[in-house]
Image: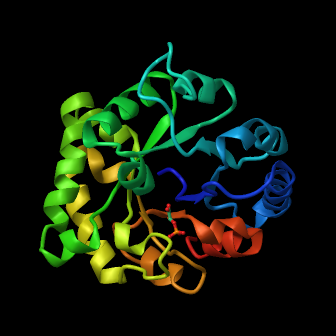
Amino acid sequence: MAKPLIAGNWKMHGTAVEAAALARQLVENEHSCAAVQLAIFPPILHVGLVALELSGSSIALGAQNMSEHESGAFTGEVSADMLKEAGCTYTLVGHSERRTLFGEVDGTVADKFEIAQRSGLVPILCVGETLQQRQQGLTLAVIAEQINTVRKKVGLKNICRGVVAYEPVWAIGTGEVASPEQAQLVHRAIRELLGPGGVSTSLLYGGSVKASNAAELFAQPDIDGGLVGGASLEADEFLKIAQLMT
Ligand code: PGA
């Protein structure tokens, strides 16, 4: 069984010096959570220098986003091959901020998932419902649609080789966390959607995870790890969260 994954999404925060310092702090203390696979997702411009800080450590590197195209005239974009070459193991695909702020639709997310795997990256497929969808009782239907579009493109077996992160949109960056029961219910449903191959797929919870709420989330049977935003910007807090996974 793979180690549980705790991923830190730094979003668009920090200077190069701050990114290097944060990575260094994590490397210096990674022994405190040896039972967990840590992964960090710096802003794209800092990926190269963070890779240098991580060399020789077991902390993995990931990207927050990538192009759905392999290469070509796509000004401003970064390809999966480039990320792989820069030392990334993982990439997020379909983070809710990409979906809501940058108009990424399920079809684009599916293309990204496919290209990420083709380049040897492990895609972390982010799914989640808005508050309005939850209030309308659409949570499981929305999640199923998001997953099924990717399934149609790459097949169930390939989704199961990736990672799925359930991140309710209303819980991201809001301080409002899903209750352990709410999160478990959706994680269970995702596990069922993935079928027998999904038994060993890592299912992460994300959305206002902190050291003060992580233990009860991680205690749920179908929550295998976390995708942490704001709380990953402080080494101590991020490491504390990771320690709660063990
Ligand atoms: P948050 O972000 O922990 O700040 O809510 C999570 C995410 O966006 O992945």
Residue 12 found in image quarter: bottom right
Q: How many marks?
A: 0
Residue 170 found in image quarter: bottom left
Vertical arrangement, residue 27 with respect to residue 174, above or below = above
In the rendered view, does 182 fall on the left or right side of 47? left
Vertical arrangement, residue 136 with respect to residue 99, above or below = below
Residue 139 found in image quarter: bottom left
Measured as percent of width and height from the top left, residue 118 is found at: 43, 22
Locate the C terminus and report the quarter of the image it occupies: bottom right
In the rendered view, does 62 fall on the left or right side of 31? left
In the rendered view, does 185 fall on the left or right side of 57? left
Measured as percent of width and height from the top left, residue 138 is found at: 14, 67
The residue depicted at 73 percent of the width and 70 percent of the height is 234
The residue depicted at 35 percent of the width and 43 percent of the height is 104
Vertical arrangement, residue 74 with respect to residue 207, above or below = above
Measured as percent of width and height from the top left, residue 107 is found at: 26, 35
Q: Of residues 22 and 11, which is closer to you in this image?
A: 11
Asked whether the viewer can see residue 161, the reply is: yes
